[in-house]
Image (cartoon, grey):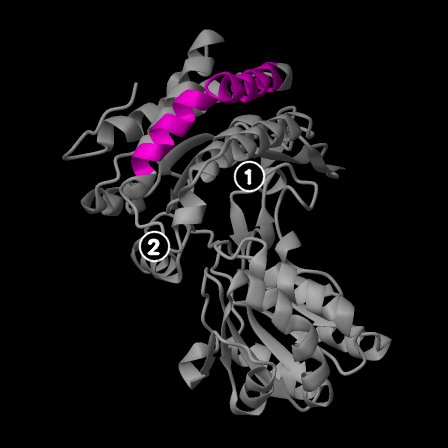
Amino acid sequence: MINNMGKTILPQLEQSRKAKSAITKLSIDQKITILNAIAEELLVNRSLILQENQKDLDRMDPQDAKYDRLKLTDDRIEGLAESVMAVSKLEDPTGKLLSKTVLPNGLLVEKKTVALGVVGVIYESRPNVTIDVAVLCIQSGNACLLRGGSDAWFSNNCLVQLIQKVLLRFGSDPNIVQLLPADRELVGELLGATKYVDIIIPRGSQGLIDFVRENAKVPVIETGAGVCHTYVDKTADLDQAARIVANAKISRPSVCNALDSVLLDGEIVDDLVKRLAPYFQEADVQVLADEASYKVWAQNNYTNLEKAEEADFGKEYLDLICSVKVVSGIDEALQHIANYSSKHSECIVSRDSKNITNFMQSVDAAAVYSNASTRFTDGGEFGLGAEIGISTQKLHARGPFALEKLVTEKWFVTGDGQIR
């Protein structure tokens, strides 16, 4: 079903346009049946999936920050299957009546939701994205073109073949879900395919996102990089703050909702570092500390410690690295976040309701938190089943880009001979 076209992706673009028509004919019950079968296929073929994933892992340095993103395990495959099942239980986002008006001339004017059409997604080192995008597009009545990175080729190829196998089994067009070649020279053809592709969604590094935004002729919805901060206010419960910061940084550092920078109120630096250092020490987090906090970390005998430079702030690490800065209070924290945030996820840990309200209302980000880890910014965690990515822009979608946003609007006008 899948082959590297080499010189051009035009045949796949044409197949996707035909598949767009085919998927609109599927009922919601048919789509649910297909998704349930995909979930079963993942579990039945987990050995094959792990085998193909290992081929990709063997080509990557285990110390590479992307290694964890690339890696599939039994638990992660089970998680993917559960995510597919969760999406299958969500309401069909298409065909919803948004407004209905009868004009004075008798015209019936209705506005309804319809699928976007053909969705192109460009992403890196994340085979789970292959499943997330495919099932979200199927459930929302969209065809999808998947362009994963070359480092995940074997994994993505295997997963797409399993999906296409299910589509064929139920008499559906297998080209509803297609994997494009990983050749870099073919990306430009996808970005310029305005005749075939309705929307492009980049998911990955800031460099990838910038490249797509700057070169695409097809409309782009950005899912931005995550430069995430946690500000610990002087009124915070410091034991709670240490647990929140540790979870946000350590639980899975390679993902976009992981913590990158901690801002500490100057009045609680000593007490918080004393509580946080054991968590960070156990995970061997590299701490890049500003002048004011460096001596405190050193006094706590923290070993993996360096002095921070200006360039260390505003950086998405995707690794066990964390910058630390001392601030004089919430105003300085807000200013620092405004200067360095990527507008993904930001958090305050505080017991001061006024400071919490000020923070939540002032910070410009897709998700803002009080007294909770930024690791919750995720379609599944928010009850959306799965996500294509976290949108950091303000047009069409913001935050987890999931099923409900894979639609657009269409006007239906019914008349009885009216002319203007």
* Left or right, residue 341 beside residue 234: left
**Which secondary structure, mark 1?**
loop
Q: Nearer the viewer, residue 139 or 314?
A: 314
Mark 1 vs 2, N-terminal side: 2
Name the residue that disc number 2 marks. 212
Which quarter of the rendered picture does the N terminus lie within?
A: top left
Residue 195, image x and y in percent?
Answer: 32, 37
Residue 6, image x and y in percent?
Answer: 16, 33
| Residue 28 is at least partly visible in this image | yes
Which quarter of the rendered picture does the C terminus lie within?
A: top right
Please report the residue visible at 63 percent of the width from the left and 39 percent of the height from the top: 404
For residue 52: magenta? yes
Residue 419, image x and y in percent?
Answer: 59, 33
| Residue 406 - label | 1
**Which secondary structure, mark 2?**
helix
* Circle 2: residue type: Val
Cα separation, mark 1 vs mark 2, equals: 19 Å
Q: Nearer the viewer, residue 389 or 155?
A: 155
* Left or right, residue 202 beside residue 187: right
> Label 1: how many residues lie within 10 Å, few (<14), some (14-19) or many (20+)?
many
Residue range in magenta is: 30-56
Q: Where is residue 230, by image quadrant? A: bottom right
Please report the residue visible at 28 percent of the width from the left and 28 percent of the height from the top: 12
Residue 354, image x and y in percent?
Answer: 83, 78
* Circle 1: residue type: Leu
**Rendered position, 232 above or below 109:** below
Q: Is the Cβ of the residue at disc 1 closer than 8 Å to that at disc 2?
A: no
For residue 36: magenta? yes
| Residue 194 is at least partly visible in this image | no
